[in-house]
Amino acid sequence: MKLFVQRLFAAASLGFMATCCFAQDGIAQDAAPAQDKPPTLVERLSDPVYMSWMSHNDVKACVKCHLEGPNVGEIIGDVQSTLTAFSRRKEMDLWVLKDKHTIARRRVEPFAESRTKAELTSLMEQLDTMSGNAAKQLQSKLGIEIDSKQIGLTKFPKEWIGTSNFLSRRICDKLWGEGSSETEEGYGKFRENCLTCHGGYEGDDTGFKLDSTAQAKIGIGCLYCHQDGNNPKWIADHSAPNPEQNWRLLPPDVKSAAGMRDLVNTAKQADLCLDCHVGNRSKNMFVTHEMYAAGHPPIPSIELQTFCREMPQHWQTPSQLHDSLVASPTRDTYFTVNYPGVSETVGAGKTYWNTRKMLLGALVARKKTLQLITETADAHTWGDYSLYDCASCHHELDSDSLRQQRGFPGAPGRPRQHEWSTALLNLALEFDRPESANQAKQAELKLASAFAAEPFGDPNRVAKTATALVDEIEETIAAIEKKPVDAAVAMNLLQKLTQTPKNALLTYDAARQVVWAIQTIVDEMKSEGALQPDDPILQAALDLGNPSVSGLSSALPSTRKQFIYDALEADLERRRDYNPAKLKQQLTQLGKLLGVTQNAKLSAK
């Protein structure tokens, strides 16, 4: 992989000057607050992630506007910045500097541990050379002086290479043979089975071969998420003069027709994220039990809003955008075009957007798990153990266990589905209408019966029932996309979550979904002023995700400096020791606090 590093940085060096139009030392045309300043030249020249992505034209074009803004000549000439309230530096900064998706492929390249020092040494040498060349060009072409001693890496960037790389190598060795990843055939298997999620690989992508790493991407690029298909027309359209009139106010379907993925639609955003975080067989995104046995860490349950916040989120929420556009005469039109039904009913400024996202994310998560099941019904992977709750088999042989006390949907001993995707389902369905919840409940019972009909389930019955349930969920998704969530609805949802029965909290992942949902709502209530900073409800919600209080952790290993594998042992121990009764007790206490708060508000009225 030394060749990977050398060619990547060589390509980046050639492309660097095309994007060196950034403001010296963070000078910004739009006078951002100090904490929102973009990285300085020295910081950028010393950042291997930033410098690496500059070798790719698509990302380079995005960074030119969304991160760098006006160039030195434009600042001197007092030319207005192209940045608007829609596109701010600080969001792009988060993507470039902290988001682990940008380096996801690099973190799973199958390195042998013995080669680590050589790889890191090569990385530092190449970065030093490229940064030095860029500094010289900045001096000769723009008159910007940078002390070469201040740039480059001073220590090994451990976030680039670590336990995840060694684990990836071990998995490849176990699945396809010792040293297989060093051959084109073996690397092809790694590409087809792993880089679909970890690298953004799609069937016709270039730069994903062992011998063509000059154009290799180190992670998920901008266009993987923001462009739908191969139509690049939107790129020029959305950056044309006066975009607020010529692009921003166009309906989402018009933008989609031009090739821009509709990420304003929350359910479509969830679909994209959950392709990897749940699975999509049609895109070859499926972690088999064999992969788990080879060492792949368990895929965690996912609550969409929580995960987006911890990425960290490199875009504005609708609520943040509504505040950013306070001086724009097109603000109301924008929200009406993009969120029909929501803005007209409650108003964009009074909508609990994150809570709404939590509900839609729950629906899409269940839909994706059902689709994953139906996609495997006719495939050779039907009955793969990864489709079922791990603890169905991996559990202590205790008599009168909690699972036995709860009972079984069919014959005892049949593996159950993963339960986390249903933890918030009824909450979301009931928000639409009670009939949706009742119909879905009947369909879920039929599905459980189909799974219990024979070991691992009857694939035909399962697929038929799951498809019908998906149709019901999709109708609910379409309805909720047009429904607002206001303060009263958020409080009602919160109270319902505290009443979650203990039987629905038996699995760690299902319980964590409930905790994440509660924390999402409470956090938004605080930001909207419905809860004061010293309100005991805030601390009670935090305690739900505190292992020393509830036995459950709501923390996520976010940012590049953390590796999932490093925290896996502690996570498994918490799962082993988890007691739903303890969490239920904390939920009951929170419910009492909410009742007191609600009664106080009613009395005040």
Image (cartoon, rainbow, N blue to C red):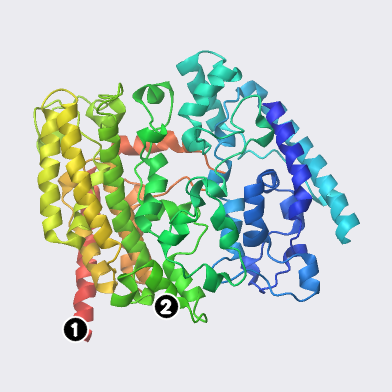
Task: Identify the residue at image location x=57%, y=40%.
Answer: 219
* Residue 544 placement: quadrant: bottom left
Crowd around label 2: few <14 · some 14–19 · many ≥20 (10 Å)? some
Q: Quadrant of the N terminus?
A: top right
Is residue 234 shown left or right of residue 484? right
Q: Nearer the viewer, residue 169 or 271?
A: 271
**Residue 204 location, x and y as percent?**
53, 33
Q: Is residue 470 above or below residue 35?
A: above
Task: Identify the residue at image location x=36%, y=68%.
Answer: 339
Q: Please name the amino acid that badge 2 sits on.
A: Asp
**Residue 546 location, x and y as percent?**
36, 51
**What residue did someone put label 2 on?**
332
Q: Is residue 566 visible?
A: no
**What residue did someone put label 1 on?**
603
Is residue 555 shown left or right of residue 180? left
Local SS, label 1: helix
1 vs 2, front mark: 2
Q: How many marks?
A: 2
Is residue 267 shown left or right of residue 446? right
Q: Marks 1 and 2, how far apart in space?
A: 34 Å
Q: Is residue 473 above or below residue 247?
A: above
Please identify the residue farthest to the top as the structure is shown.
177
Do callouts 1 and 2 mark residues in contact (Cβ within 8 Å)? no
**Residue 20 location, x and y as percent?**
76, 56
Q: Nearer the viewer, residue 554 or 366?
A: 366
Task: Identify the residue at image location x=35%, y=50%.
Answer: 303
Q: Quadrant of the C terminus?
A: bottom left
Local SS, label 2: helix
**Residue 567 location, x and y as percent?**
46, 38
Task: Identify the residue at image location x=19%, y=70%.
Answer: 595
Q: Please name the amino acid that badge 1 sits on.
A: Ser
